[in-house]
């Protein structure tokens, strides 16, 4: 079975698409970067005075890819090369995932399904530099996940 986005081919194209989409949406500022130590990419933009930061983990995607494509004696690469390939796949995939997620959020805003704040609330940056979700987690404002998480009552 294949993992969604594992065959994505260009992170640069996805990044350009995100920038064009956000500019058309009315964003005044746009920046992107990589945190090599944490294996994350980030996108920052400003819309009507609200600064937003989105992060995606290439390492997280690589770990999921390795579960779908575990190393074995039949693998034509060394274990190190296989793991490096997984990170490379993840580095491209996360840009495509972010592009599609941003496109969905912007579309939902444009059709009146939700407000900008509802779509991006957890990613809005506070004056401290933290995002709303980082602050909420640090202050323990959210209830702990329960063991029934994901279950649907019949």
Image (cartoon, helix red, strand yellow):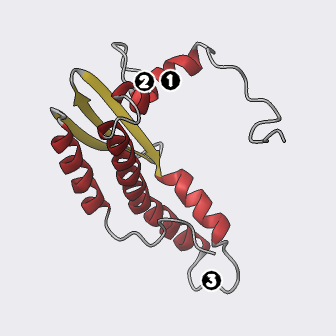
**What is the distance, in whole Å, between disc 1 and disc 3 at their CAs?**
39 Å
16 lies left or right of 132: left
- Counting from the top left corner in percent of width and height, residue 6 is at 49, 69
Task: Give the residue at x 70% y 20%.
Answer: 143
Task: Give the residue at x 47% y 53%.
Answer: 58
On screen, 34 above or below 133? below
Residue underneath mark 2: 131
Which one is in front in this view, the residue at disc 1 or the one at disc 3?
A: 1
**What is the distance, in whole Å, between disc 1 and disc 2 at their CAs?**
5 Å
Q: Quadrant of residue 91?
A: bottom left
Residue underneath mark 1: 134
Dividing the image into 4 quarters, which one contains the N terminus?
Answer: bottom right
Badge 2 crowding class, 10 Å Cα cut-off, few under 14, some 14 to 19, many 20 or more, is: many
- Counting from the top left corner in percent of width and height, residue 16 is at 21, 55
**What is the distance, in whole Å, between disc 3 and disc 2 at their CAs?**
41 Å
Question: Is there a contact, CB below 8 Å, between mark 1 and mark 2?
Answer: yes
69 lies left or right of 120: right
- Counting from the top left corner in percent of width and height, residue 129 is at 36, 19
Task: Give the residue at x 39% y 48%.
Answer: 104
Residue underneath mark 3: 75
Residues 118 and 90: in front is 118
As helix, strand or loop, the secondary structure at mark 2 comes to loop
Quick one: label 1 or label 3, which is nearer the N terminus? Answer: 3
- Counting from the top left corner in percent of width and height, residue 66 is at 62, 66
On screen, 24 above or below 87? above
């Amino acid at each position: 079975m294949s993992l969604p986005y594992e065959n994505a081919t260009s992170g640069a194209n996805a990044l350009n698409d995100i920038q064009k989409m956000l500019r058309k949406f009315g964003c005044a500022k746009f920046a992107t970067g990589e945190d090599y130590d944490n294996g994350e990419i980030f996108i920052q933009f400003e819309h009507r005075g609200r600064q937003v930061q989105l992060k995606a983990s290439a390492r997280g995607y690589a770990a999921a890819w390795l579960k779908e494509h575990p190393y074995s004696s039949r693998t034509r690469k060394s274990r190190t090369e296989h793991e490096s390939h997984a990170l490379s796949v993840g580095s491209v995939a996360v840009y495509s995932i972010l592009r599609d997620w941003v496109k969905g959020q912007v579309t939902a805003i444009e059709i009146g399904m939700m407000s900008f704040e509802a779509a991006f609330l957890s990613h809005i940056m506070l004056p401290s530099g933290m995002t709303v979700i980082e602050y909420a987690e640090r202050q323990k404002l959210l209830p702990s996940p329960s063991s029934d998480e994901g279950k649907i009552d019949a």
